[in-house]
Amino acid sequence: MISRSMIPFTRRWVVKIGSALLTRDGAGLERSMLAPWVEQISARRVAGNEVVLVSSGAVAEGMARMGWQARPKALHALQAAAAIGQMGLVRAYEDCFQARGLHTAQVLLTHDDLADRARYLNARSTIRTLLKLGVIPVINENDTVATDELRFGDNDTLAALVANLIQADLLILLTDQDGLFDRDPRAHADACLIPETRVDDPQLDQVAGGSVTGLGTGGMVTKVRAARLAARSGTPTVIAPGRGEDVLGRIGEGERVGTLLVPFQGPQAARKQWLAGHLQVRGRVTLDAGAVSALREKGTSLLAVGVKKVQGTFNRGEVVACVDESGCEVARGLINYDVQEVERVKGQPSSRFEAILGYLDEQELIHRDNLVLL
Ligand SMILES: Nc1ncnc2c1ncn2[C@@H]1O[C@H](COP(=O)(O)OP(=O)(O)O)[C@@H](O)[C@H]1O
Ligand SMILES: N[C@@H](CCC(=O)OP(=O)(O)O)C(=O)O
């Protein structure tokens, strides 16, 4: 089980910054507030971390641009505010990161995108590619099409889903408090900080209250829920004070900053449960002996070259069983190509995909992150 001392060895982080932090009393985005996080994220990259940023603030910035004092109640007005403000949000991040020599990329997602398996794989490949290119993905909800999420304002959940998507080693939810307290510190001056607990601690249901800032909307309820979601991929969560001095650097050094919410199982077990529990097997591929031992002994991805036979009717993103030549199931996972494509590339090296299919989506038929050995 993860502890603070293991955090310095984590690599892939999802960092979420809430509206409450990015604006000062509803006055729109403040670049001076954003700059410290950009500096800290840039420093984490130098320290070897891959960082994905999930940032709220579009509605707050849109409201400020339109001169609105209160968060609109009507959904279409909220959506309009988000669309207006998103321009300012990405511009501010782009300027700040560019000044440190880093490229940024805008990624707008909805929860539905991550529930659909093909779109899930597409989003995953894009974000992984951006990370490989050394670019900082700046993610927000696609508020023009997402409605419930915007009404309840929930980028905490989005950040957790992104952590699941890219199998992050750590989710950091930066907020305007020092972490999670045993009671809302705005209402109770004697509230005590919870330094660390397991995500399934029932106490968390009692302590997590809503937001009162009028800018952020989720409060701690959505942060605790997000930590529980992140735990599905074995990802621990730190709820941390966004205004603290070099907060990301200190978390990265294993310092006891904020609240650490620890998952109840490791990434492997969590992944296995997710694949076993939620998805139906749509087909199977028979592997030669070399592919079986590569999967079992070296933990590699499944390549087409080791596939001898294909059965079933599956699409990209569906679950396929990998069996050995005697029909015994070795592994199962999310496949990157549909059945007709696999039929055409089986037994072939990935370097031939483009010649055979006319395109190359991924080198692997099943990436090892999406594969569970049985
Ligand atoms: N147990 C708690 N511990 C800390 N903060 C709490 C708690 N319960 C409710 N809150 C409230 O949650 C707020 C942070 O949530 P929110 O305003 O949605 O921020 P963000 O924009 O960062 O998501 C805090 O300002 C605090 O008033
Ligand atoms: N996606 C929207 C709303 C998200 C939201 O309110 O989240 P948060 O401030 O993190 O509770 C925005 O960018 O303003």
Image (spheres, grey):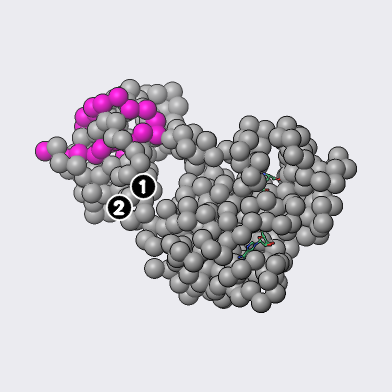
Question: How far across and how far down the image is residue 213, in percent?
Answer: 74, 56
Distance from Cα at disc 1 to Cα at disc 2: 19 Å
| Along the viewing direction, whichever of 129 and 13 lies nearer the viewer | 13
The image shows residue 118, relative to residue 10, as above or below, that is above
Boundaries of the magenta span = 302-326
Q: In which quarter of the image is residue 255?
A: bottom right
Residue at the disc numbered 1: 274
| Along the viewing direction, whichever of 328 and 227 lies nearer the viewer | 227
| Along the viewing direction, whichever of 233 and 362 lies nearer the viewer | 233
Taking the spot 84% from the left edge, 52% from the top edge, the residue there is 27
Residue 325 magenta-highlighted: yes
Q: Is mark 1 within 8 Å of ligand 2?
A: no
- Residue 299 marker: 2
The quadrant of the picture occupied by the N terminus is: bottom left
Q: Is residue 52 left or right of residue 300?
A: right
Question: How far across and how far down the image is residue 194, in percent?
Answer: 55, 72
Q: Which amino acid does label 2 sit on?
A: Gly
The earlier-in-sequence mark between 1 and 2 is 1
Question: How far across and how far down the image is residue 220, in percent?
Answer: 60, 59
Residue 207 magenta-highlighted: no
Taking the spot 51% from the left edge, 72% from the top edge, the residue there is 196
Q: Which amino acid does label 1 sit on?
A: Trp
- Residue 176 marker: none
Look at the image and tell me whether residue 182 can be seen.
Answer: yes
In front: label 1 or label 2: 1
Mark 1 touches mark 2? (CB < 8 Å): no
Taking the spot 24% from the left edge, 28% from the top edge, the residue there is 310
Taking the spot 74% from the left edge, 43% from the top edge, the residue there is 59
| 10 Å crowding of disc 2: few (<14), some (14-19), many (20+) | some
Q: In this view, does 367 lie to the left or right of 307?
A: right
